[in-house]
Image: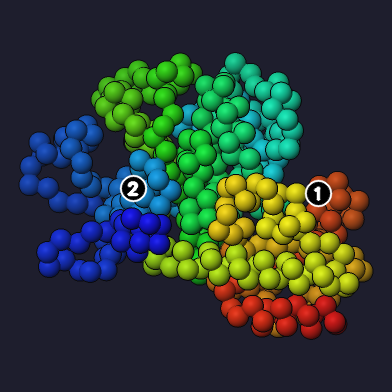
Amino acid sequence: MKIETKCIQEGYKPKNGEPRVLPIYQSTTYKYDSADFMGKLFDLEEEGFFYTRLANPTVDAVEKKIAALEGGVGAMLTSAGQAATLISITNIAGAGDHIICSTAVYGGTFNLLGVTLKKLGIETTFVEPDWDEDRILKEFKPNTKAVVGETIANPALSVFDIEKFAKIAHENKVPLIVDNTFATPVLCRPFEFGADIVIHSTSKYMDGHAVSLGGVIVDGGNFDWAASGKFPEFTVPDESYHGVVYTKNFGKAAYIVKARAQLMRDLGSMMSPQNAFLLNIGLETLHLRMARHSENAMAVAKFLENDPRVSWVNYPGLESSKYKPLVDKYMPLGASGVVSFGVKGGREAAVKFLDGLKIAAIVTHVADARTCALHPASTTHRQLTDEQLIAGGVSPDLIRFSVGIENVDDIIADIDQALEK
Ligand SMILES: *Cc1c(COP(=O)(O)O)cnc(C)c1O
């Protein structure tokens, strides 16, 4: 099946006489006829549901759909994108371990790795994604356990060279984890370029309507945990799970089964069946929306680039962007829906521009069907001076513009009248 068909048909497969649309299984627990069968479930010898913290039929169907969209062997939904990032890393690293992460990542990822995981004993070295291979290789240590990057970085909008980082990670016998939130599997499938684990905040384009928070971890199934020699937790019996050996019992799905069996069991950051139901509806139209988001964003970026009231524009799909060659390689169908730009007149002019918008709403969220805008200098970063903002890579005039799927003429007319003000 092509990706458009998978968006609709993968996941839930009703049997004779069952509801056509994925039902919401609003049940924490499941009934069995014998204690013996249930015992087998607990030993992971039989497949089945026993408690919604670990698995639920609604959530399971959506996990299967996302695994199919990314081309992975299995997926696990989480309560939010942050939980997906946390579990994707702690499934392979613990106190005393080290991670290499691109500097061009979501602020929440930067804090999780730089502050909270550090408190738990996992150190992170942040590397500039544009550094050459040799420079990045120097940052590896014997205890490095993973490399992390973001397909299209939020909010920097730089494009991650997945093949380059996969090669570097594999030379060091560790997996590459890619946050594919902004691209979605419709525009880019990181496994096809060597990534090993893909994560998402499904709160963004996958849900697409800003109605439910969520995250997902997808296992590509290609990393050889046993051959690496760096991941004994995969190859020795797990005493907390009746001696299961993940690579032996679950083969290619070792990583994702271990994430569920150990971390979802212990951390409990599962997605609710209700949110999985809403996410599934969003996924059905993902291919239509991503095409329109990309097309509209390109038109908005071109309009801004040719407007004398605008001082700069950053959209990776533009011919003038230094990331255009990477866009051509990794996401030829489009560069997604987020554009950033600066208006002449700096911080004050940016505030006026935002206040003047009539269609685009001022919100902190990005990446949903409705056009929205954010001015970090007057909101999320308002405590910082112009100098501090520049040092942090956010210019005082920066506007993050998330282009929706309205008619693009209306979006551009809205920008035009707000610029005029
Ligand atoms: C929003 C976001 C996250 C965090 O996701 P939540 O669902 O808000 O927890 C992670 N990565 C990227 C790229 C994001 O945009």
The numbered disc on residue 193 is: none
Q: What residue type is labelled 2?
A: Arg
Q: Mark 2 points at which residue?
A: 53
Residue 373 is at least partly visible in this image: no
Tell me the crowding category of disc 1: few under 14, some 14 to 19, or many 20 or more residues within 10 angstroms, Cα based: few
Q: Where is residue 41 in the image (x, y as percent from the top left)?
A: 19, 38
Q: Residue 273 appears in which quarter of the rendering?
A: bottom left
Front residue (pair 330, 41): 330
The numbered disc on residue 393 is: 1
- Point out the image quarter for the C terminus: bottom right
Q: What element carries label 2?
A: loop
Query: Horizontally, is 327 left or right of 132 in the view?
Result: left
Picture residue at 19% right of the left edge, 33% below the top: 45
Query: Horizontally, is 156 left or right of 208 in the view?
Result: right
Mark toward the start of the polypeptide (2 vs 1)? 2
Q: Where is residue 17 in the image (x, y as percent from the top left)?
A: 12, 68
Q: What residue type is labelled 1?
A: Gly
